[in-house]
Image (cartoon, rainbow, N blue to C red):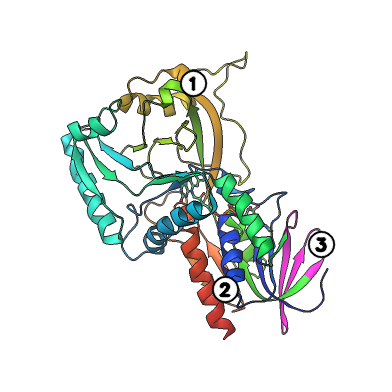
Amino acid sequence: MMEGAVDVVVVGGGIVGCSIAMELTARGVFKDVILMEKGPFLGDGTSTRNSYVIHAGIYYPRDSWKAKFCVAGNRALYAFCGRYGIPCVNTGKVILAFSAAEMPILERLRRQGELNGAEGLTLIDARATRQREPSIRAAGALLAPSTGVFDVAQWFRVVEGLLYEQGAMVLKNTPVVGLESMAEGIRVATGTRGEVPARFVVNAAGLHADDVGNLLGNRFRIYPIRGDYFTIGGKKAGLVHGAVYPPPGELGLGIHLTRLWDGTLLVGPDARRVERKDDYGPLPVFDADGNLDYESADFQRFFAPVKRYFPAVEAADLHLAHCGIRPSLLPPGEKGFRDFRIEWDRSDGRVLHLLGIDSPGLTASPAIAEHVADLLAERAG
Ligand SMILES: Cc1cc2nc3c(=O)[nH]c(=O)nc-3n(C[C@H](O)[C@H](O)[C@H](O)COP(=O)(O)OP(=O)(O)OC[C@H]3O[C@@H](n4cnc5c(N)ncnc54)[C@H](O)[C@@H]3O)c2cc1C
């Protein structure tokens, strides 16, 4: 493949790996930056299988990486999309309370979001909620004006071009299958293009960051949590103007509505644990004739909660869409918050691991990239 050690190999061409490669090449501190992606295109993993939401930064504890990177990433993403003409809409979002008794939950979220630096968070009553979203029924809401959506597929097209322009080497269909510590660098073995020594390796392999990290003898473990979506198009989609969320649940943010830049409405995701990291098969919601079975438990799991706050929706409005899998650090049976983990390898301080980059990883990605570039520049001296 190549002779001599390259400066940095970034493993994983999702939004995080691409943002890191972009930041490193933009700064010009490192000469050779190679991005290795095992799939046939950039964004082949979780980054193109989600809600495409630019989050405000509400849900995460103060001073967590998630809170800091989300708030900083929110601004950076809007600016980036604006600069490169990537479809992006600042829709705003309402988190609903279904009764007065739930308003204190929203007040807690408002306080937390405000401490995190999320902008313009306001509690609104039932009337103001109706004015904003006339088709939604609620006792009140928390309004998050800085929430929006962006066209992630277009982001990848733009960024791939920028990476080439900035001098990064982008290798697709290139799985990293081995990492070995040597005096002159880390030997990075690929399944398709031989091996290359690198001064630094950044492990941004998303769902597989544990597998890649464990090539150096670690015992990382990522737990896949799947989320599915339905979609609503046409006039019904037009009844909702921005993002509409119920109060958050234990594993996810509740079945919500997200109005996209093209006017369609996403319904979902849910959150349930799966065994496999490639469990992308369709939900079992079809009858023997291949029609959506509206009575099936998996369909009702989406439809029933949405019908509660969006009464105009009918079962026939929903169509099965995509699913995505979160790279969670939360073991089964446990509850609570898990922050992003960004840490140097314990046995080789030239390898940086990014673990548990689940939501809001999309939003946080520009800020994660800055942080990683700072860490590498500092270590390189
Ligand atoms: C259902 C769902 C909804 C979400 N909604 C949002 C949202 O609205 N807003 C938000 O901010 N975040 C959201 N997220 C989180 C967000 O999608 C992720 O945090 C983000 O995409 C993570 O990006 P990544 O680059 O770390 O991972 P990935 O996109 O998974 O990229 C990792 C890449 O590494 C590659 N790879 C793996 N192993 C190897 C190897 N051995 N060699 C080479 N390459 C390898 C993979 O093919 C993949 O392309 C959501 C996630 C899910 C699942």
- Indicate left or right for 243 with 41 as reference: left
| SS class, disc 1 | loop
Identify the residue at image location x=34%, y=49%: 146
| SS class, disc 2 | helix
Q: Is residue 46 visible?
A: no
Q: Read off the residue under disc 1.
A: 296
Q: Amino acid at mark 2?
A: Arg
Q: Quadrant of the C terminus?
A: bottom right
Q: Residue 364's spot in the image, x, y percent?
A: 46, 58
Earlier sequence position, callout 1 versus callout 3: 3
C-alpha gap between disc 3 and disc 2: 27 Å
Q: Is residue 191 visible?
A: yes
| SS class, disc 3 | loop
Q: Read off the residue under disc 2.
A: 27
Q: Is residue 192 above or below residue 128?
A: below
The stretch of residues the image draws in magenta is 171-195
Q: Nearer the viewer, residue 87 or 94?
A: 87
Q: Is residue 187 above or below residue 222?
A: below
Identify the residue at image location x=35%, y=19%: 312
Q: Residue 257's spot in the image, x, y percent?
A: 40, 34
Q: Residue 333's spot in the image, x, y percent?
A: 43, 49
Are there few (<14), some (14-19), or many (20+) residues within 10 Å of tag 3? Answer: some
C-alpha gap between disc 2 and disc 1: 53 Å
Q: Quadrant of the N terminus?
A: bottom right
Q: Amino acid at mark 3?
A: Arg
- Residue 88 is a magenta residue: no
Q: Nearer the viewer, residue 318 or 281?
A: 318
Image marks 3 and 2: residues in contact by CB distance under 8 Å: no
Foreground disc of the pair 1, 3: 3
Disc marking residue 368: none
Q: Read off the residue under disc 3.
A: 193
